[in-house]
Image: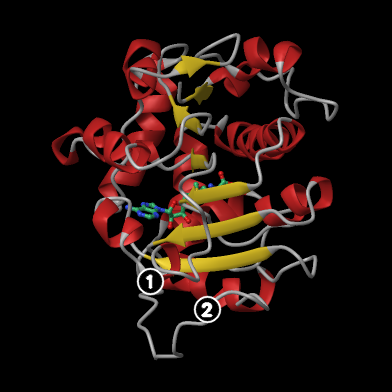
Amino acid sequence: MSTAGRMEPIRSVNLRTDRPQSARMYDFLLGGKTNFPADRATAEQALSAYPGLRTITRANRAFMRSAVNYLAAQGIRQYLDIGTGIPTSPNVHELAQRALPDARIVYVDNDPIVLAHARALLSNTTPEGRVDYIEASLLTPRQILEHPCLTGENAALDFDQPVALQLISVLHFVADSDDPYALVRELLEPLAPGSFLVLSHATADSDPTAVNRGADTYRSSGVDFQPRSRAEVARFADGLVPVAPGVATPTEWWPAVGGPEPLPGADDPAVNDAYLLLARKP
Ligand SMILES: C[S@@+](CC[C@H](N)C(=O)[O-])C[C@H]1O[C@@H](n2cnc3c(N)ncnc32)[C@H](O)[C@@H]1O
């Protein structure tokens, strides 16, 4: 997909458009066009159960933009973005390469529809940068870390240099039974000191009734969804040094790190139904 990156061979895939999928529901919530009736129906049900869903979706996307701006300002030139989603401009590589033209980004998602769009949309914006895409699941870190794109002489990322491991709005799709903490540890393990963990995660701490109603809608449509508490989200950063203010809701985090873009939906209490976290590997 990039001028310098590797293209995976084109193959035919079953997109299972008869079933809702989180990437397409997220696209619908952001006003995109890459979604099907099953995705729209489930997203509408989730919105009726939990009207704050659209607010938190937009705030999450704004978090991604501000986190990448922050990291690029710290000189972070390498990004491993797992749970990429259907491309919505500006994407990680556009922001990172705007600040650091030689920035390298590897996107990872397990939904084939993301790959289909990634081919068209996630192209390098600079001659010296690089963008690659891996179709794999967060549930199988080895498959990601040992992918040809991340190994060998032409590897897209140099693990001896800092990397931002981005898990933005994806860990709540991983059930406790899949041990999300072990998955994050395994992904952080090969990264150089000075690397960052970047995550956002749904929580039911502020409004358990509404958020759990929304989560039930996802689960009853076959999409795992597990909001987590502040303490549970903080555990993802065990052994890391959190960037102030640590695990924070968007309204806590924005004055400290966010901006210059204002927090969208700041006047809706639902904007705080997620925790944000940036933490550095010592
Ligand atoms: C809510 S979207 C978030 C998109 C983007 N990170 C953002 O915040 O704008 C979640 C994405 O995670 C992907 N996803 C869900 N479970 C995954 C898994 N086990 N492995 C890789 N990607 C996954 C979905 O396909 C979807 O594209």
Give the answer, above or below, for where 231 lies relative to 275: above
Q: Nearer the viewer, residue 46 or 279?
A: 279
Residue 167, position in %: x, y? Answer: 46, 40
Count the labels in the image. 2
Q: Is residue 265 left or right of residue 191?
A: right
Residue 189's mark? none
Give the answer, above or below, for where 253 lies relative to 8: above
Q: Secondary structure at mark 1?
A: helix
Q: Quadrant of the N terminus?
A: bottom right
Asked if one can make out residue 131 in the rendered structure from this viewpoint, the answer is yes
Quadrant position of residue 209: top left
Q: Secondary structure at mark 2?
A: loop
How packed mark 2 is, by other alpha carbons closer than 10 Å (few <14, some 14-19, many 20 or more), is some
Q: Nearer the viewer, residue 48 or 175?
A: 175
Residue 188, position in %: x, y? Answer: 37, 37
Name the amino acid type tagged 1: Pro
What residue is drawn where x is 83% and y is 51%? 98
Quadrant position of residue 266: top right
Q: Which residue is mark 1?
A: 148
Asked if one can make out residue 36 in the rendered structure from this viewpoint, the answer is no
Q: CA distance from mark 2 to mark 1?
A: 9 Å
Q: Which residue is mark 2?
A: 6
Would you say the residues marked 2 and 1 are in contact, meaning their CB atoms lie under 8 Å apart?
Answer: yes
Residue 159, position in %: x, y? Answer: 46, 48
Q: Quadrant of the C terminus?
A: top left
